[in-house]
Amino acid sequence: MKTKRASVCTFILILFFIFTIIVPVYANDIDNSNYIQNASIGNITFDDDFDLDTISEVLGPFDSVEKTITDTGFIEKTYYFERGTVHVLFDKVVGATVIFPASPTGETLSTPRGVTVGQYKTQVLKAYGRPAYGQSDIYFYGEGPYKLCFHLNKSGYVKAISYFVDGL
């Protein structure tokens, strides 16, 4: 009887391990259909209208702006703030990078799945699964031009989170 009970307990532990550790690692499901829901950090969301005052509340004081010509010939503006950057095209947010875990007001600057700057890479893997493409210091998620990136320091902690549309 004890052997049967031990086997059942072992089986339950194995199932628990599979569903809490292994299954989430294969959950990389960011694609063109759900990118907008996943491309946000705090309340800075892809395709939002750009508002300097609103973004300043999230990323701190505005520092400077840089204009560049995209591959398609349009003017993209990159706004630099104390806690990150925002990329704007046609007055719409098309990308952002955050380098702090919280806004100046204390609001957590996390992704929709709860990942923030300062968390260990296992939190990223648990929330997003295996990256579509990865290097030792950057995990890329998404397909086609749509990207969500987690930049890691040498110890494996998230030092920045970015989302953008490649090739605009």
Image (spheres, grey):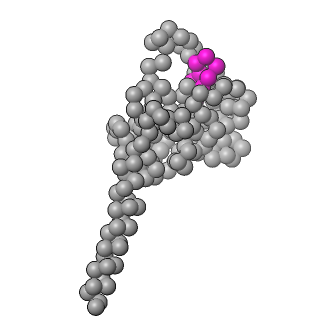
Which residue occupies 44% across, 24% down?
A: 166
Seen from the viewer's position, the closer of residues 92 and 11 is 11
| Percent of width and height locating residue 155 | 40, 48
83 vs 148, left or right, is right
Residue 119, placed above or below residue 93? below
Q: What is the quadrant of the N terminus in the image?
A: bottom left
| Percent of width and height locating residue 167 | 44, 19
Is residue 88 covered in magenta? yes
2 vs 75, left or right, is left
- The reply to whether residue 152 is in sight is yes
Residue 89, placed above or below residue 4? above
Residue extending farthest to the top is: 73
Picture quadrant of residue 147: top left
Residue extending farthest to the bottom is: 1
Would you say the magenta stretch is mainly helix, strand or loop?
strand
Is residue 79 covered in magenta? no
Which residue occupies 62% across, 41% down?
A: 42
- The reply to whether residue 162 is in sight is no
Which residue occupies 61% across, 23% down?
A: 92
162 vs 25, left or right, is right
Residue extending farthest to the front is: 33
Which residue occupies 72% across, 44% down?
A: 105
Residue extending farthest to the left is: 3
Give the residues in magenta.
85-93
| Percent of width and height locating residue 145 | 42, 26
